[in-house]
Image (tube, coloured by chain):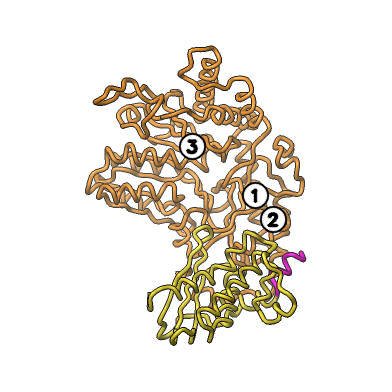
Amino acid sequence: MSDLQELYQSIILDHNRRPKNYGALEGASHRAAGRNPDCGDEVTVELRMSDDRIDDVRFTSAGCAVSRAAASIMTQQVKGKTREEVERLFAQFRGLVTGAVRPTEEEARRMGELAAFSGVARFPIRVKCASMPWHTLQAALRGSPNG
Amino acid sequence: MSRRADFPLLAADPALHYLDSAATSQKPRVVLDAERAFYERDNANPHRGAYELSARATDRYHAARERVARFLGAADPACLVFTRGTTESLNLVATAWGHASVREGDEIVVTALEHHANFVPWQQLALARGARFRVCPLTPDHRVDLDALRAMVGPRTRVLAFSHVSNAVGTVNPVQRIAAVGRAAGALVVCDGAQGAPHLRVGFDALDVDFYAFSGHKMCGPMGIGGLLGRRAILEAMPPYQFGGDMIEYVRDEDSTWNVLPHKLEAGTPNVAGAVGLAAACDYLDGIGLDAVLAHERRLVRLASEGLAALGGVHVYGPPPEERGGVVSFTVEGIHPHDLATVLDREGVCIRAGQHCAQPLMRRLGVPATARASFYVYNDEQDVDALVRAVRHAQALFGERAPSTDALAAGPGAR
């Protein structure tokens, strides 16, 4: 079960049980809904931007533990960041979950809880679960305000 | 006696517990051999070559049609149209018959149990023709609500389409009683047999339906072959579905005429090897006997349902096991079906997790997804044990740390 324990680390299970920043965002300026038609997972991300920076972010979801925890940790990590910083973080995260990049210890430390998703790389069919919240965030950022 | 040895994929991997036969069945060696033998000895384009080899390919194709028609209880093989499978069969009816026959103000009735393949073609036909599309509700144990159906079907109903067996929760529908409601209203009665033909004796000639659609790959046959059984008068009266080779009689510059049944509805070079493989699958299933197949599945379904229920925190959908096909659709408290499928996969247990191409049903069940284990001729008690054991392991892995129900209920898919 070691692969499984790496996938379902307690950080991920904790965020699945008690997601952070969960629910509707009052006064959201941007929002997007993502859906995986294969499995029916849904996530909605709402943002309040001030200039180029994410002032606040919340999400709702109906999906597996991996997608819910990914969304929860994502919202914690992107709050206060600019679009460019978010893009950089997503690129790092994508590298991690696809197994394309193995972060150094120092990089993993800087990624914080995002590093808990390293186990996803051994489950290729679950990569989309981890990355869907990020794609939805990107769509919200690209969309017109209140789109 | 286990039939695993008949199936090369399963024989090669004793640790594999394949519980996704409602999606596609594994293939016995006799089917693979039949397909291969066709290509090695009889391969040519049927119906057109002026040489003996082509005549042999034609004979093989006709013999396969007769065999499959006999398996499904149709005395007239010309009323069996080979297609790619159930989806194409249903689209054939909705497109060719539907566009010629459904008018503005007509009504099309389906049930809330339907697979998208028996839902969306009718919905889109209704939208295109200005007809009204209606969805018959279910009883609390996920059967078609016959009273509601009787109230819904009336003189305006042009089509009544329903499944023989639900792919998502396993409900075996009372075909004759549902068909009778459509008949009384003068509607075209269409039955989606994708989950019926592999497990139940169809007996098409005695069934009071106009069309019966099925897939070969769910009944030990190859992928890419299936069929549509129809009543001769309707098949003859309806226009073709696709145009091309084989389906024509005369092609003039101004217009064309059509070949006789079943060729009118089979444009282009047919999947002869697939049909030959499907005929071998019918031989294989008849060798076991469909009554024995169903009894075997029901026993495994009952064992699985009991084993899962004994774990606690497991909810099984659909009617009781003795009124279900070989399907156990369930959810485990605190574990999303996809997470469950991943854990089970690590123990060699293959199940389906998701919406089972039945979003309208999932909305009515009030769940974003379910896990589904489905059984067939090659499964045995060891597969059931592996399933129950793996679910128990998943519960242990997720332990106390299951998501709060508040958070789940607040999800957009929980509506």
Q: Which segment did they paint magenta? A: A1-9
Left or right position of B111 against B296: left
Instruction: Name the subunit of mark 2.
Output: B
Q: Are marks 1 and 2 in contact (CB under 8 Å)?
A: yes
Chain letter, colour yellow in render: A
Mark 1 neighbour class, 10 Å CA radius: few under 14, some 14 to 19, many 20 or more: many
Q: Are marks 3 and 1 in contact (CB under 8 Å)?
A: no
Cα separation, mark 3 vs mark 1, equals: 24 Å
Cα separation, mark 1 vs mark 2, equals: 9 Å
Per the rendering, the mark at residue B87 is none
Instruction: Choose mark 2 or mark 3, whichever is in front.
Output: 3
Picture residue at 69% right of the left edge, 53% below the top: B349
Task: State the SS at label 3.
Answer: loop
Residue type, numbered disc 1: Leu
Per the rendering, the mark at residue B19 is 1
Asked whether A7 falls inside the magenta stretch, the response is yes
